[in-house]
Amino acid sequence: EQKLERVRQQVRSFPDFPSPGINFRDITPLLKDPSAFCTAMDLMEAHVRKCFPRVDVIAGLDSRGFLFGPVLAQRLGIGFVLIRKKGKLPGPTESVSYSLEYGKAELEIQTDAVDAGQKVLIIDDLLATGGTLWAACQLMKKKGAEILECLVLIELTSLRGTEKLKSVPIYSLLQYD
Ligand code: 5GP
């Protein structure tokens, strides 16, 4: 609890960013505080070690999933792969499109990033409506990977992202309304 509080203290809010009515949770103070950042990673690592005897790969979401995913993967002694917005990855890729509040977006993964049957943890900084993690899960399913869980630093509970993700387990360190 004390450790979680240390992490929570380094998340700040910006009302009306990036548009009116949105209360943006900013994780940059956490990244600037090596001790609090280390505590957040300790908590994530302890959770993963406790719940999953075997994880093959961590898949991180563009772009803030890239801040936490490689650190966790290094601690677990496993690899990290990138799930990116469309058009950023070279070579053969597979993609999934998903709807945003206005319009559509696409996520992509390199075809050789994960193998069928591999046990994957998907990581991002924050779960809001769940659209982004949902698309990431579709990509992993397309590849035949086994999704163990989606792991986030922050969950915005009132947006009910866990319902959108249905059968996929979600774990968050911090929850906000
Ligand atoms: P969702 O697809 O669940 O609606 O939105 C989650 C995605 O949007 C994540 O990739 C996350 O980085 C970004 N996002 C949405 N709202 C916030 C926020 O308040 N703070 C941060 N740090 N990221 C957000």
Image (tube, grey):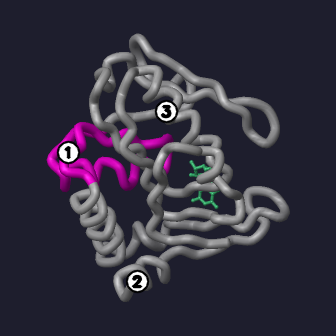
Q: Which residue is mark 1?
A: 54
Residue beneath the point at 49% across and 56% down: 125
Question: Residue 129 placed where, x, y %?
Answer: 67, 51
First of labels 3, 2 by sequence position: 2
Question: Residue 172 placed where, x, y %?
Answer: 47, 63
Q: Is residue 146 above or below residue 27?
A: above
Residue beneath the point at 19% across and 42% down: 78
Q: How many numbered marks does the figure carry?
A: 3
Q: Is residue 173 above or below residue 146?
A: below
- Closer to viewer: mark 1 or mark 2: 1
Tag 1: amino acid = Arg
Residue reaching furthest to the left = 77
Question: Residue 97 placed where, x, y %?
Answer: 64, 25
Q: Which residue is mark 3?
A: 84
Q: Which mark is residue 116?
A: none
Numbered disc 3: secondary structure = strand
Examine the image and state in which quarter residue 46 appears. Answer: bottom left
The magenta segment is 52-80
